[in-house]
Image: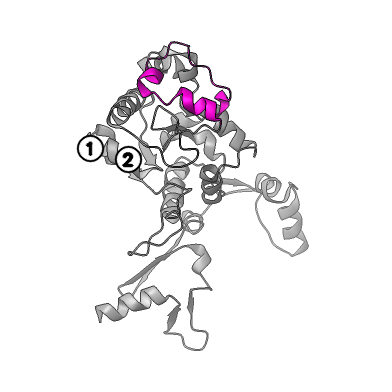
Amino acid sequence: MYDNKLLEIDFYKNSETHRLMLPYIGSEYEKYKVLIVGESHYLREDSDREKVKDFKKWLTDKNEIKLIKPEYINTRWVVKEHCNNNNKQPFFSMIKKEIINVEKFWDKVSFMNFFIVPSINGSREIEALKDMKEKSLENFENVLDVIKPNYILFLSKKSYCIFEKQNSEFLKNTYTFCHPASAWWYRKRKDGGKSSDEFREKIYDLCSKTYSKDINLKAVSEAVWKDPDYISNYAANNGFIINAEFTADETELKKLKKYSISSDKIKLDFPPEYMGNKIYPDPSKDDIVIIRSESFADKLRAEQ
Protein backbone atom coordinates (compact mmCIF):
# COMPACT_ATOMS: atom_id res chain seq x y z
CA MET A 1 0.00 0.00 0.00
CA TYR A 2 3.01 2.32 0.35
CA ASP A 3 4.99 1.41 -2.74
CA ASN A 4 3.30 3.82 -5.14
CA LYS A 5 4.30 6.79 -3.00
CA LEU A 6 7.72 5.38 -2.13
CA LEU A 7 8.47 5.03 -5.82
CA GLU A 8 7.86 8.76 -6.25
CA ILE A 9 10.92 9.48 -4.07
CA ASP A 10 13.81 10.61 -6.27
CA PHE A 11 16.31 8.02 -5.13
CA TYR A 12 14.05 5.02 -5.75
CA LYS A 13 12.71 6.15 -9.11
CA ASN A 14 16.21 6.71 -10.48
CA SER A 15 17.04 3.11 -11.24
CA GLU A 16 16.05 -0.52 -10.75
CA THR A 17 19.15 -1.03 -8.62
CA HIS A 18 18.09 1.73 -6.23
CA ARG A 19 14.61 0.22 -5.95
CA LEU A 20 16.15 -2.89 -4.43
CA MET A 21 16.72 -0.74 -1.33
CA LEU A 22 13.04 0.06 -0.79
CA PRO A 23 12.05 -0.43 2.87
CA TYR A 24 10.71 -3.78 3.99
CA ILE A 25 7.18 -3.33 5.36
CA GLY A 26 5.52 -6.09 7.37
CA SER A 27 1.95 -7.20 6.67
CA GLU A 28 0.74 -5.87 10.06
CA TYR A 29 2.83 -2.69 10.09
CA GLU A 30 -0.30 -0.50 10.07
CA LYS A 31 -1.28 -1.80 13.52
CA TYR A 32 2.08 -1.16 15.19
CA LYS A 33 3.86 1.49 13.06
CA VAL A 34 7.35 0.55 14.30
CA LEU A 35 10.33 1.29 12.02
CA ILE A 36 13.65 -0.48 12.64
CA VAL A 37 16.63 1.38 11.14
CA GLY A 38 19.95 -0.30 10.40
CA GLU A 39 23.09 1.37 9.09
CA SER A 40 23.87 0.12 5.58
CA HIS A 41 23.87 -2.81 3.24
CA TYR A 42 27.25 -4.20 2.29
CA LEU A 43 28.61 -5.84 -0.83
CA ARG A 44 30.71 -8.99 -0.85
CA GLU A 45 31.99 -8.86 -4.43
CA ASP A 46 35.02 -6.64 -5.04
CA SER A 47 33.74 -5.74 -8.50
CA ASP A 48 30.42 -4.61 -7.03
CA ARG A 49 32.18 -2.47 -4.45
CA GLU A 50 34.14 -0.79 -7.21
CA LYS A 51 30.88 0.11 -9.00
CA VAL A 52 29.49 2.04 -6.02
CA LYS A 53 32.77 3.63 -4.97
CA ASP A 54 31.93 6.91 -6.72
CA PHE A 55 28.97 8.16 -4.67
CA LYS A 56 27.89 10.84 -7.15
CA LYS A 57 27.84 8.30 -9.96
CA TRP A 58 25.88 5.90 -7.77
CA LEU A 59 23.41 8.59 -6.72
CA THR A 60 22.61 9.68 -10.27
CA ASP A 61 22.52 6.18 -11.75
CA LYS A 62 19.90 5.64 -14.48
CA ASN A 63 19.97 1.85 -14.75
CA GLU A 64 23.60 1.83 -15.86
CA ILE A 65 25.05 0.21 -12.72
CA LYS A 66 24.49 -3.54 -12.71
CA LEU A 67 25.67 -5.54 -9.70
CA ILE A 68 26.81 -9.15 -9.84
CA LYS A 69 25.15 -9.86 -6.50
CA PRO A 70 22.25 -7.35 -6.30
CA GLU A 71 20.44 -9.40 -3.66
CA TYR A 72 22.83 -8.14 -0.99
CA ILE A 73 21.26 -4.67 -1.19
CA ASN A 74 17.71 -5.95 -1.63
CA THR A 75 16.20 -4.96 1.73
CA ARG A 76 13.07 -7.04 1.39
CA TRP A 77 14.93 -10.11 0.19
CA VAL A 78 17.42 -9.84 3.06
CA VAL A 79 14.64 -9.76 5.68
CA LYS A 80 12.72 -12.62 4.09
CA GLU A 81 15.88 -14.72 3.91
CA HIS A 82 16.34 -14.11 7.64
CA CYS A 83 12.73 -15.15 8.32
CA ASN A 84 13.39 -18.36 6.38
CA ASN A 85 16.54 -18.95 8.46
CA ASN A 86 18.78 -18.51 5.41
CA ASN A 87 20.33 -15.20 6.48
CA LYS A 88 23.05 -15.74 9.10
CA GLN A 89 24.29 -12.14 9.29
CA PRO A 90 25.20 -11.22 12.91
CA PHE A 91 22.92 -8.16 12.70
CA PHE A 92 19.82 -10.32 12.25
CA SER A 93 21.03 -13.20 14.40
CA MET A 94 21.48 -10.91 17.40
CA ILE A 95 18.06 -9.35 16.89
CA LYS A 96 16.50 -12.80 16.68
CA LYS A 97 17.74 -13.67 20.18
CA GLU A 98 15.93 -10.65 21.64
CA ILE A 99 12.59 -11.03 19.83
CA ILE A 100 12.08 -14.75 20.36
CA ASN A 101 9.01 -14.11 22.57
CA VAL A 102 7.42 -11.61 20.18
CA GLU A 103 5.15 -13.54 17.83
CA LYS A 104 5.42 -12.65 14.12
CA PHE A 105 7.83 -9.81 14.88
CA TRP A 106 8.78 -9.09 11.27
CA ASP A 107 5.11 -8.89 10.27
CA LYS A 108 4.65 -6.02 12.72
CA VAL A 109 7.52 -3.75 11.77
CA SER A 110 9.16 -2.05 8.83
CA PHE A 111 12.90 -2.05 8.24
CA MET A 112 15.39 -0.04 6.21
CA ASN A 113 19.03 0.92 6.27
CA PHE A 114 19.75 4.61 6.76
CA PHE A 115 22.51 5.02 4.20
CA ILE A 116 21.46 4.87 0.54
CA VAL A 117 24.77 3.44 -0.59
CA PRO A 118 26.15 0.06 0.51
CA SER A 119 29.35 -0.10 2.51
CA ILE A 120 32.45 -0.86 0.48
CA ASN A 121 34.28 -1.99 3.64
CA GLY A 122 32.77 -5.44 3.62
CA SER A 123 30.72 -5.93 6.78
CA ARG A 124 32.59 -3.18 8.61
CA GLU A 125 31.25 0.25 9.47
CA ILE A 126 30.49 2.49 6.52
CA GLU A 127 32.76 5.46 5.84
CA ALA A 128 30.26 8.25 5.28
CA LEU A 129 31.26 11.52 3.64
CA LYS A 130 29.30 14.76 3.99
CA ASP A 131 27.24 14.47 0.79
CA MET A 132 26.53 10.81 1.55
CA LYS A 133 25.13 11.77 4.96
CA GLU A 134 23.05 14.62 3.54
CA LYS A 135 21.51 12.59 0.71
CA SER A 136 20.84 9.62 2.99
CA LEU A 137 19.12 11.88 5.49
CA GLU A 138 17.03 13.47 2.74
CA ASN A 139 15.90 10.06 1.51
CA PHE A 140 15.19 8.86 5.05
CA GLU A 141 12.97 11.86 5.77
CA ASN A 142 11.11 11.27 2.50
CA VAL A 143 10.43 7.68 3.57
CA LEU A 144 9.17 8.86 6.97
CA ASP A 145 6.70 11.19 5.26
CA VAL A 146 5.28 8.20 3.38
CA ILE A 147 5.14 5.41 5.97
CA LYS A 148 4.68 7.73 8.99
CA PRO A 149 5.95 5.48 11.81
CA ASN A 150 4.78 6.06 15.36
CA TYR A 151 8.09 4.77 16.70
CA ILE A 152 11.60 4.62 15.25
CA LEU A 153 14.29 2.32 16.65
CA PHE A 154 17.81 3.04 15.41
CA LEU A 155 20.28 0.16 15.56
CA SER A 156 23.09 2.43 14.45
CA LYS A 157 24.46 5.25 16.60
CA LYS A 158 26.12 6.83 13.56
CA SER A 159 22.82 7.04 11.67
CA TYR A 160 20.91 8.30 14.69
CA CYS A 161 23.39 11.13 15.30
CA ILE A 162 22.80 12.39 11.76
CA PHE A 163 19.02 12.24 12.13
CA GLU A 164 19.04 13.73 15.63
CA LYS A 165 20.44 17.06 14.42
CA GLN A 166 17.38 17.70 12.25
CA ASN A 167 15.01 18.16 15.19
CA SER A 168 12.40 16.17 13.25
CA GLU A 169 8.81 15.82 14.45
CA PHE A 170 9.48 12.06 14.56
CA LEU A 171 12.35 12.49 17.02
CA LYS A 172 10.15 12.49 20.13
CA ASN A 173 9.34 8.80 19.65
CA THR A 174 12.78 7.76 18.41
CA TYR A 175 15.09 5.44 20.35
CA THR A 176 18.68 4.47 19.70
CA PHE A 177 20.66 1.33 20.48
CA CYS A 178 24.10 -0.01 19.65
CA HIS A 179 24.56 -1.95 16.44
CA PRO A 180 23.65 -5.61 17.20
CA ALA A 181 26.89 -6.85 15.62
CA SER A 182 29.05 -4.53 17.73
CA ALA A 183 30.86 -5.48 20.92
CA TRP A 184 28.65 -3.02 22.83
CA TRP A 185 25.41 -4.90 22.13
CA TYR A 186 25.83 -7.17 25.17
CA ARG A 187 28.39 -5.08 27.06
CA LYS A 188 27.29 -3.35 30.25
CA ARG A 189 27.64 0.41 30.40
CA LYS A 190 28.65 2.27 33.54
CA ASP A 191 24.99 2.65 34.48
CA GLY A 192 24.57 -1.14 34.32
CA GLY A 193 22.37 -1.08 31.21
CA LYS A 194 22.86 -3.06 27.99
CA SER A 195 21.58 -2.24 24.51
CA SER A 196 20.35 -5.81 23.98
CA ASP A 197 18.15 -5.69 27.11
CA GLU A 198 16.81 -2.22 26.32
CA PHE A 199 16.00 -3.17 22.74
CA ARG A 200 14.16 -6.32 23.88
CA GLU A 201 12.08 -4.38 26.40
CA LYS A 202 11.22 -1.64 23.92
CA ILE A 203 10.22 -4.13 21.24
CA TYR A 204 8.03 -5.98 23.74
CA ASP A 205 6.33 -2.72 24.72
CA LEU A 206 5.73 -1.54 21.17
CA CYS A 207 4.84 -4.84 19.55
CA SER A 208 2.57 -6.06 22.34
CA LYS A 209 0.38 -2.98 22.72
CA THR A 210 -2.32 -4.20 20.39
CA TYR A 211 -2.01 -7.85 21.29
CA SER A 212 -5.22 -9.64 22.09
CA LYS A 213 -4.96 -10.84 25.70
CA ASP A 214 -7.29 -13.76 24.94
CA ILE A 215 -5.35 -17.01 25.27
CA ASN A 216 -6.40 -20.04 23.27
CA LEU A 217 -5.11 -23.20 24.92
CA LYS A 218 -4.95 -25.25 21.72
CA ALA A 219 -3.06 -22.49 19.91
CA VAL A 220 -0.48 -22.21 22.70
CA SER A 221 -0.05 -25.99 22.84
CA GLU A 222 0.43 -26.19 19.09
CA ALA A 223 2.94 -23.31 19.09
CA VAL A 224 5.08 -24.63 21.95
CA TRP A 225 4.69 -28.42 21.90
CA LYS A 226 3.42 -29.00 18.34
CA ASP A 227 0.43 -30.77 19.88
CA PRO A 228 -2.87 -28.84 20.24
CA ASP A 229 -4.03 -31.08 23.11
CA TYR A 230 -0.81 -31.17 25.13
CA ILE A 231 -1.84 -28.69 27.87
CA SER A 232 -5.45 -29.91 28.16
CA ASN A 233 -4.28 -33.53 28.44
CA TYR A 234 -1.67 -32.57 31.04
CA ALA A 235 -4.31 -30.68 33.03
CA ALA A 236 -6.77 -33.58 32.87
CA ASN A 237 -4.13 -36.13 33.92
CA ASN A 238 -3.11 -34.01 36.91
CA GLY A 239 -6.53 -32.96 38.12
CA PHE A 240 -6.37 -29.33 36.94
CA ILE A 241 -9.43 -27.48 35.67
CA ILE A 242 -8.55 -24.95 32.98
CA ASN A 243 -10.73 -23.26 30.37
CA ALA A 244 -10.06 -23.73 26.67
CA GLU A 245 -9.88 -19.93 26.34
CA PHE A 246 -9.22 -17.25 28.94
CA THR A 247 -7.94 -13.70 29.27
CA ALA A 248 -4.31 -13.38 30.32
CA ASP A 249 -3.48 -11.51 33.51
CA GLU A 250 -1.64 -8.35 32.45
CA THR A 251 0.65 -8.43 35.51
CA GLU A 252 1.74 -12.00 34.81
CA LEU A 253 2.18 -11.24 31.11
CA LYS A 254 4.57 -8.40 31.90
CA LYS A 255 6.76 -10.80 33.88
CA LEU A 256 7.80 -12.30 30.55
CA LYS A 257 9.65 -9.02 30.11
CA LYS A 258 10.66 -8.14 33.68
CA TYR A 259 9.70 -8.29 37.33
CA SER A 260 8.73 -5.02 38.99
CA ILE A 261 8.40 -5.30 42.77
CA SER A 262 7.77 -2.34 45.05
CA SER A 263 7.36 -2.45 48.84
CA ASP A 264 8.56 -0.62 51.93
CA LYS A 265 9.79 2.28 49.72
CA ILE A 266 12.13 -0.10 47.87
CA LYS A 267 11.64 -0.83 44.18
CA LEU A 268 13.33 -3.55 42.15
CA ASP A 269 13.08 -3.97 38.36
CA PHE A 270 14.89 -6.93 36.84
CA PRO A 271 14.61 -9.48 34.00
CA PRO A 272 12.96 -12.84 34.73
CA GLU A 273 16.21 -14.80 34.43
CA TYR A 274 17.51 -13.02 37.56
CA MET A 275 14.76 -14.47 39.78
CA GLY A 276 16.17 -17.27 41.92
CA ASN A 277 19.59 -16.71 40.42
CA LYS A 278 20.85 -13.22 41.18
CA ILE A 279 17.86 -12.06 43.23
CA TYR A 280 15.96 -14.23 45.69
CA PRO A 281 14.55 -14.23 49.26
CA ASP A 282 16.72 -15.72 51.99
CA PRO A 283 15.16 -19.14 52.73
CA SER A 284 16.03 -18.92 56.42
CA LYS A 285 15.00 -15.31 57.21
CA ASP A 286 11.73 -13.73 56.11
CA ASP A 287 12.99 -10.13 56.07
CA ILE A 288 16.12 -10.61 53.93
CA VAL A 289 16.41 -10.45 50.14
CA ILE A 290 19.70 -11.50 48.55
CA ILE A 291 21.04 -9.63 45.52
CA ARG A 292 24.16 -11.12 43.98
CA SER A 293 25.81 -8.36 41.95
CA GLU A 294 29.32 -7.06 42.49
CA SER A 295 28.71 -3.85 40.53
CA PHE A 296 25.44 -3.15 42.40
CA ALA A 297 27.18 -3.74 45.72
CA ASP A 298 29.96 -1.35 44.73
CA LYS A 299 27.45 1.37 43.88
CA LEU A 300 25.60 0.84 47.14
CA ARG A 301 28.84 1.13 49.11
CA ALA A 302 29.69 4.31 47.22
CA GLU A 303 26.34 5.83 48.20
CA GLN A 304 26.99 4.96 51.85
Magenta-colored span: 45-72
Q: Residue furthest bottom?
A: 284
The location of residue 296, given as percent across then percent down, is 37, 74
| Residue 74 visible to the viewer | no
Relative to 114, is 153 above or below?
Answer: below
**In magenta segment, residue 136:** no
The location of residue 185, given as percent across then percent down, is 44, 53
Relative to 292, is 79 above or below?
Answer: above
Image quarter where the C terminus lies is bottom left
Q: Which mark sits nearer the N-terminus, 2 or 1?
A: 2
Q: Amino acid at mark 1?
A: Lys
Total label count?
2
Q: Which residue is mark 2?
A: 160
Q: Residue at x 58, y 25 (%)?
A: 69
Relative to 286, is 27 above or below?
Answer: above
The location of residue 180, given as percent across then percent down, is 47, 48
**In magenta segment, residue 52:** yes
**Cβ atoms under marks 2 and 1 closer than 8 Å:** no
Q: Which residue is mark 1?
A: 165
In terms of depth relative to the viewer, which is nearer, 101 or 134? 134
